Image (tube, rainbow, N blue to C red):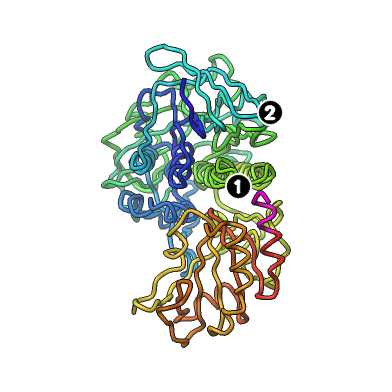
Amino acid sequence: MGRTDVLIVGAGPVGLTAALELRRRGVTCRVIDKLRAPVPHARAVGIQPRTLELWDRAGVADDALAAAVPMRGQLVYIDGVERSRVALTLPPDVPYGFAALPQYETERILTEHLERYGTTVERGTELVSFVQDGGGVWSSVVTETGRTRDLRSRYLVGCDGAHSAVRKGLGLTFEGGAFAEEYMLADVETDWSLPPGYAVRAMRPGGDGRPDDLLVGIPLPGRSRYRMSMLVPPELSSSGGPPDPVAHGTQEGLRPELAHIQAVVDRLAPEPATVSGMRWSSVFRISHRIVDRYGTGRVFVAGDAAHIHPPTGAQGMNTGIQDAVNLAWKLALATAGLTTPSLLESYDAERRPVGEEVVGRTVRHATGGGVPSGPDDLGTVMLREAQLLVGYRDGPLTGAPSGGPGAPDSGDRAPDCGGLVGPLTRYGVRLFDLLRRGPDHTLVLYGPDTAALDRFGGAVAELTRRTHGRVPVVALLGIGEPVEGNSRVPLWSDSRAEFRRIYRTEAPTAFLVRPDGYLATRFGPDNVTELSAYLTRVLRT
């Protein structure tokens, strides 16, 4: 029998992220996965800028960037003619761009970081059943040797994919449907001369406007290497087999050969090209489904266990990673006995609307040819695809907005900025550098001068009292103000006025930043009640 704070089922990117976020907050956890070894396939490939921001806070971003390649844009060809060339550009204050990183590399990097905390994945171990009570969860697992064991944990998190045993054990509904089409996936090299870093989408539309023939290539690390997907030829179709109630992901059966991939490239590539060096291939199906709730009691689901959808825009894994980050900091407070039950309930309230939006948007894009469309300008589309517009303004933890039109406010992503200079630094550092120094909330104070900062004494005292000094405080001074080295809190100069511009503040303003990089609340020096109200929503009194 084993005991732990949190048992995580599934060692994909979502489960590994959940474990890493828990361990760096001192929470004990175990990670089990029924597979005996990681899958060496480039399944999920796209890494969104928002994911890189979260990995920055966890200390993972540098390793991910070293292994990834930039995603610069998308080329769309219809009947062999280039119809659009979309550049994946973002505002200059966004610290990261779009990247491509094979899932097996993502899992390797996250596993290595998790192992630094002394936690390893228990492979060949499958969850059979579980039952929860008022104090925790009993889980029955079968180990690699075939032995059945009972594990005791305070919480259980299912990150075990589209066929999740945790979701089924909770009795959650998984409403949606499946696409009729089947696809081939292959990891290959190609010798075409198309610009590097650009995804390629080539198609021939049918009578109904939907693709009759399709080729999608996503750049991978390596010389001229792409993950290609295309419609399955009849000889590889699995549609004659038994129906799968959740037809999503790779399918058992025949594997495409290099000749199958070459035949599609010959038909659809915008220039003559030869594919070679195939590392792996598979047939896969796509469904779109979402659960009716993200958890019950002490048991939760995240990632594909909670929502599945078309891979358009690389939204799936990234959405799941954000699920894990959102849940982990709340579980950390819960295991420490510092929070109310409503904080864990906010996981569903905040993340399920995000999952619903992603499922709906990716289905629209998949049926509309893969090119983002709608009333928004291209800049807004890029921010949405980068997952930088995800927010919780309507969530239960969010207070009343106080920043004015267009200003980052309670429930919004806390944006980055540069040019922060300290008493011993002559170069500007980033706000994200200051926020990642601890896994908890951070209070950021801004004032035009030190007298303005002194007005936040009541807020700092309230925060210190309510959190027992766990929450660090960072103070920013207006441009041109001298930074003294004997301040009671770390003091930095907004030397280029980037913080003032991006956060749209002239007057003294405080920003409490959540552990997942969202603004908990924004308030002035005379409004300590707003800070107190948020702390009451989150912490046990």
- At 66% from the left and 32% from the top, the residue drawn is 297
Is residue 407 found left or right of 203 in the rendered image?
A: right
Is 45 or 407 nearer to us in this picture?
407
Residue 407 rendering spot, x and y as whole percentages: 63, 71
Magenta residues?
534-541
- At 44% from the left and 59% from the top, the residue drawn is 436
Is residue 532 depicted above or below 3 in this figure?
below
Dominant secondary-structure state across the stretch colored magenta: helix
Residue 382 rendering spot, x and y as whole percentages: 53, 59
Q: Is residue 357 visible?
A: no
- Which label number is shown at residue 338? 1
Is residue 525 found left or right of 444 in the rendered image?
A: right
Q: Amino acid at mark 2?
A: Thr
Q: Amino acid at mark 1?
A: Leu
Q: Which comes sooner in the sequence, label 2 or label 1?
A: 2
Q: Secondary structure at mark 2?
A: loop
Is 174 or 166 nearer to us in this picture?
166
Of tags 2 and 1, the one toward the viewer is 1
Is 444 or 450 nearer to us in this picture?
450
Is residue 362 found left or right of 536 in the rendered image?
A: left
Specify the quadrant of the image occupied by residue 196. Answer: bottom left
Q: Which residue is mark 2?
A: 173
- At 65% from the left and 75% from the top, the residue drawn is 525
Is residue 540 found left or right of 473 in the rendered image?
A: right
Magenta region includes residue 305: no
Specify the quadrant of the image occupied by residue 520. Answer: bottom right
Residue 72 rendering spot, x and y as whole percentages: 41, 57
Is residue 325 depicted above or below 89 in this figure?
above
Q: CA distance from mark 2 to mark 1?
A: 31 Å
Q: Secondary structure at mark 1?
A: loop
Estimate how packed mark 1 is, as few (under 14), some (14 to 19) or many (20 or more) residues with alpha carbons within 10 Å.
some
